[in-house]
Amino acid sequence: MIRAQFLAGIGAVAGATQVAQVSPFTPTLRFAVVCPQSGPDARLGRQLLAGVRGAIDELNNERMLNEPILLFDSYDDHNTTADATVQASFATASPTTLAVIGHISSAATLVAEPAYSNAQIALIVPTVTDDSITARGYRNVFRLPIKDSDEGGLLAAYAIVTGAKSPVVVTQDGDYGPSAAAGFVRRAGAMHVNAATESFPLERPEFAGAADRVLAHAPDCIALAGNVLDMGPLIKMLRAKAYAGRFVATQGFFDTLTLKLDPKEIEGLIVSTNVPYFPLAPTAQRNVQLYQAQYGALSPVAAYGYAAVQLIRLAIRRTGAANRLAVVRALASGGAYDTVTGSYTFAASGDVVDPNCYFYRVKDGKFAYERQAHPSGFMLK
């Protein structure tokens, strides 16, 4: 991922395009990235674009002479539904654009999906885990991270295999959490364990009452399906009410804010996440090292931007796809594609076949990698 000499920077305005020193006789492969590059969520958009650039740099530097040069256009959706609709139309306007990477939120992605479907172009979803993204029947949508309900199921399996006999999963009535909680309960039931569930309001939460309802089930393990910013105070309340059992949590707790909670209350907390532990992923280490040498730490969002570019390139290289529909078909039926964030084979829904996630334990104020949900060829452990 060393920065290619023939690629210049990318702007932060809608439709910004690299200025590439490319011979008119050199084949090109063009795709679009739609994400916030200004506004409150611009930081995440910049991370996604950094991952995209990093992948392009490496792949272009190492391409064979007869292979196309990767190019991309970026479009600023401000992470709003109104702008997402407009920018999706811009992103698909050029017939030379063969795929799109975006968006970074559920609302923006959902509102733009019909535009991508009408344009018959592959949409690679790099960060959004909301079940509804792939539940609408679009066959051109391909999601990289595990969806919420699958993650909840894998978290339940972890909790039960490691000893939980009477778990309770707690969530809130917001956009994130309920699907993961539902997946937790279903998987627990399939493993012949009756998992109770409790929910409390996202707006004006009453943590004392929620804690009382949870503890009424006499849990030996409490699963938190939500975000640490919203649900973190519940841990303190449960400990104050003498709960001494285990906590497990979904990836909304894989956040530095979790580590700022009282260390005595969260020591041993297990958090599931889409983020692999790269030191134990041999096939990804070279990519990560090259990226870090040029751009610094590879954030989770950047890693998925990087993987999305790899996915597009691999699908076209493997099948020779030369138009939008051929790219969609290649991703839908092209077998396993190995990227920096894992190996992907997509089901008809657009979600990965045999999804996986990774578990980290809070230990001495840090996230310490423990293991993956199930063995894979990507991770050593």
Image (cartoon, rainbow, N blue to C red):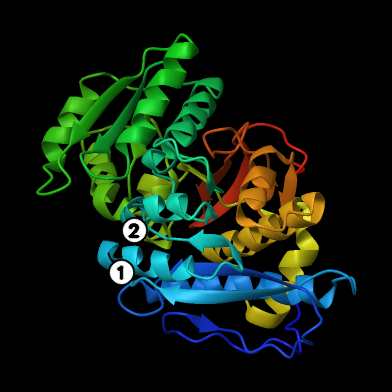
* Amino acid tagged 2: Ala
Query: In which quadrant of the rendered image does the N terminus lie?
Result: bottom right
Which of the 4 image quarters holds residue 49? Answer: bottom right
Disc 2 is placed on an element classified as helix
Q: Which residue appears at 48% of the width and 12% of the height?
A: 190
In screen coordinates, is 32 left or right of 224? right
* Amino acid tagged 1: Asp
Query: In which quadrant of the rendered image does the C terminus lie?
Result: top right
Q: Is residue 249 above or below residue 157?
A: below
- Residue 174 picture location, percent across and down: 23, 44
Q: Nearer the viewer, residue 94 or 152?
A: 94
Disc 1 is placed on an element classified as helix
Q: Nearer the viewer, residue 237 or 291?
A: 291
Query: Which residue position is annotated with label 2?
Result: 108
Q: Which residue appears at 74% of the width and 49% of the height?
A: 338
- Residue 328 picture location, percent across and down: 61, 47
- Residue 20 picture location, percent across and down: 69, 87
Q: Which residue appears at 38% of the width and 69% of the height?
A: 87
Q: Is residue 147 above or below residue 215?
A: below
Q: Is residue 355 above or below residue 221?
A: below
Q: Nearer the viewer, residue 68 or 35?
A: 68
Task: Give the mark nearer the N terminus: 1 vs 2.
Answer: 1
Query: Which residue position is annotated with label 1?
Result: 83
Q: Which residue appears at 55% of the width and 25% of the height?
A: 162
Mark 1 crowd level (few <14, some 14–19, many ≥20, 10 Å Cα): some
Contact? badges 1 and 2 (CB < 8 Å) = yes
Q: Nearer the viewer, residue 124 or 226?
A: 124
